[in-house]
Amino acid sequence: MSLSIIIVLAVLSGVTGSPSVAPSPAAADATAHPNSVVEETEIFGWQQVSVEKEAEENAMATGELNPNHYPAQRAAKVVQHYLNVQYGSPFRLFGLHKVHSGNAEDVADSGRKYQLEISVQEIINNTTEKCSAEVLFGRAGEQRSSQVQVSCEELLKTSTDAQQDALFRKYQMNQSLLSAENLPDSYGHMEPDHQPLWHLGIVASSSVMLKESTENTLYNMAQVANIIQLASDNKQVKFDCHVLLHEMVSQEIIHWKLLFTWSPPDGVKVLQMEKLPHCHDCKVPPNTN
């Protein structure tokens, strides 16, 4: 029998921050089997998009996939992480809006390939594009990141160069190094000046989520626990960051410590990532994306 879990997600918003939506106790305490049922309400900015309740399905299904079931949704989420790693910035963030169709096939000696038609939202500028994507998961036990190919040219046409250059100069000229914690706070709020730091934390965390994602996981960014600007040269700004990731299948909150740099020409580059010890008493934060 399918296990029904209700999870409310509050995802990224542009200037106003993430709305606060607390999960129900059942959602926070439940442990989801990879094939269990999930009913989600995703919030893009202030617009709610209901994800249809799914029926139990084999996580390793082959052939045409139900776009609302776990196999297609997991593969599509990896595309979101990939886009943020490749093109994300303090002024450009990507979210999965909808999966239209999906197909999975076994590839000899390589793994399993998912071909997807999805809609991706560039959240800060509130633009959405239908994209074709391909995700190749390695064989079970292989220690390598998923391989992703995606075509979303329209989402990249909006230039954010002027905004990035202005923010970069501001960070370089700070008389005291920046720091912030609990982005967003327990009510889903943050100071406007901290929005770019939250966005940088999301882009950096996407490197971890892309690396860790498999056919049996579904990662969301939960919170930047703290972020500290470090001294660096004039070509980049450097940050030490502690982030919380929500693995939706196991309902585990996973802590990671990241060291990364950012500059407008080079984007976000993660120099070091370290998984911190498991926190048995940690609860699901009120906002995940």
Image (cartoon, rainbow, N blue to C red):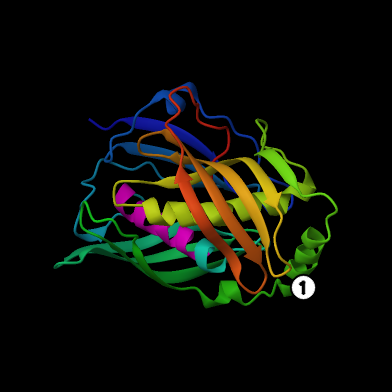
Query: Please, what is the three-letter code of the amino acid marked with disc 1?
Result: Ala
- Horizontally, residue 80 falls left or right of residue 145, namely right
- 265 lies left or right of 168: left
Residue, disc 1: 162
Q: Quadrant of residue 162?
A: bottom right
Compared across the picture, whether 176 is left or right of 60 comes to right
Give the vertical position of 204 relative to 246 (above or below). Answer: below
Residue nearer the viewer, 63 or 188: 188
Q: Which residues are magenta?
A: 70-83
Q: Residue furthest right?
A: 175
Badge 1 element: helix
Examine the structure image and report whether residue 208 is included in the region drawn in magenta. no
Query: Which residue sits at x=52%, y=29%?
Result: 23
Mark yes or no: residue 95 visible: no
Residue 172 visible somewhere in the drawing: yes
Quarter holding the N terminus is top left
Magenta span includes 80: yes
What is the x, y in percent for residue 120?
A: 51, 63
Residue 249 against residue 78 in the figure, above or below: above
| Residue at 52 percent of width and 51 percent of height | 205
